[in-house]
Image (cartoon, grey):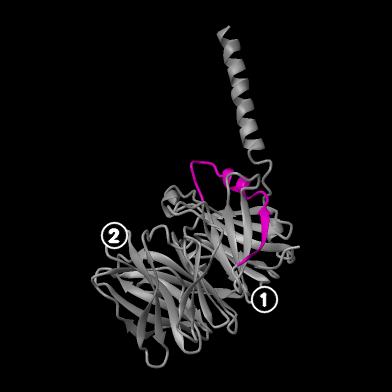
Amino acid sequence: MKKLLFVILGVIVITVLVYFFFFSNSNVDWISEEDVQKKDFLKDKHAVIYLSSTADQDMDGKGISYAVFINKNGEASGYKMNGLELGGIGVSENKKELLLESKDKLKFVGENFKEFKMKYQHTGDYRAYLKNSDLFVNIYNSGSNPDTGGYDSNVVYGNKKGIHKGNIPHYLMSSGVDEETILVITQDIDKKEYSLKKLVFNDLKMKLEDVTEISLDKIMSYSSYSSILSDSNYYYTVLVENDNTIKGKVYLLRIDKTTLKQELILLSSEENTTASIPFTKYNSAYFYNNELYFINGLGNVITFNTQTNTVNTKFKIDYHVTDGVRYNEQTFFKGDQLHVLRYDENRKDKYYIEIYSLKNGKKIKESEVIGMEEIINSVQGGKSIHAYDFKVLGSKN
């Protein structure tokens, strides 16, 4: 009798396990290695989202990341890689080539697939594409260097012909691009000293050059809310100033390229700087029609007019969360539009994309993302993933 009972229990357990592993993933559209290597892989892709487990979840070597591609019909499909906290997607100028990164590999996807191994990295930082040089540049927050006692931010740069390695011996507060130059703001956390530097690439050799020291109040602490942007006359970046409370002021730091004169321009005063952290730091600021646009984590779109030096809250997206709780929301500026990846637990398809006009702030379009929730829910082994990047590649049907 006991033997029969054990047999019945065994059958039930096996049935439950089969059901769980099969049916929990049956609605997920997975991208195979064969598919991602096809020359026309990007042909029908509208957008891509990068999600990953955090660095601490990779202590067992089983951290995971996903590049979730959304096709022009709004259908999501997932490509699984090794984890990389704060990782992202590199995009070429013509959107025909992407660079996918994980903790130990770089994959060029598009017209010609190519894969390279690289030194293990636990945390991403910044990625950019230099059009004239045809160089993808990826920077990683590599951490303290036990040999030098300093800090390392490893740089991997190249294209499908090959990759090269460099290093910035500093902790980075922010990064950006000025034509063919990578800009970085380095930070000495203990001394509260900041410096603007640039990376120059000649004959595939990287050189780190000083631009200027940045003068900020040492009584206060500062964090970056955006990438570094530039026009013909100035460098810009958005900073938040804190005085050890949750309140803080958000400034636009502007540095004259010729005189190196610096000024802090007040954008807003926040009651909760945690809630106002942008959904996507490096996709939070953008130039359009002589205005610098910045969207914070409350959905407020603030502009600085470079001709009149005036600040305005131009519009607010349809977002009403004020406690800073996030569900993988992301933002991306493209042309005269702002694209926002949103989440609503009351919808059948919980993720969707909104498009807003930068000209008048009105919502132009809203479309469902079909299958993304299933991809996120398929994660097993006690891991969880978070969105760190969002890129719009082309128009939808």
Residue under the image location 58 percent in, 70 percent down: 333
Residue type, mark 1 in image:
Asn
Image: 90 above or below 130:
above
Q: Which mark is residue 94?
A: 1
Q: Position of residue 390 (x, y in %)?
A: 57, 63
Image: 199 above or below 55:
below
Q: Which mark is residue 245?
A: 2
Residues packed near mark 2 inside 10 Å, few (<14), some (14 to 19) or many (20 plus):
few
The C terminus lies in quadrant? bottom right
How far apart, in angstroms, are the residues tagged by discs 1 and 2?
44 Å
Residue range highlighted in magenta: 362-385
Q: Position of residue 67 (x, y in %)?
A: 60, 57
Q: How many marks?
A: 2
| Secondary structure category for the residue under label 1 | loop
Horizontal side, residue 141 vs residue 114: left or right: left
Residue type, mark 2 in image:
Thr
Residue 106 painted magenta: no
- Asked if residue 187 can be seen in this view, the reply is yes
1 and 2 marks in contact (CB < 8 Å): no
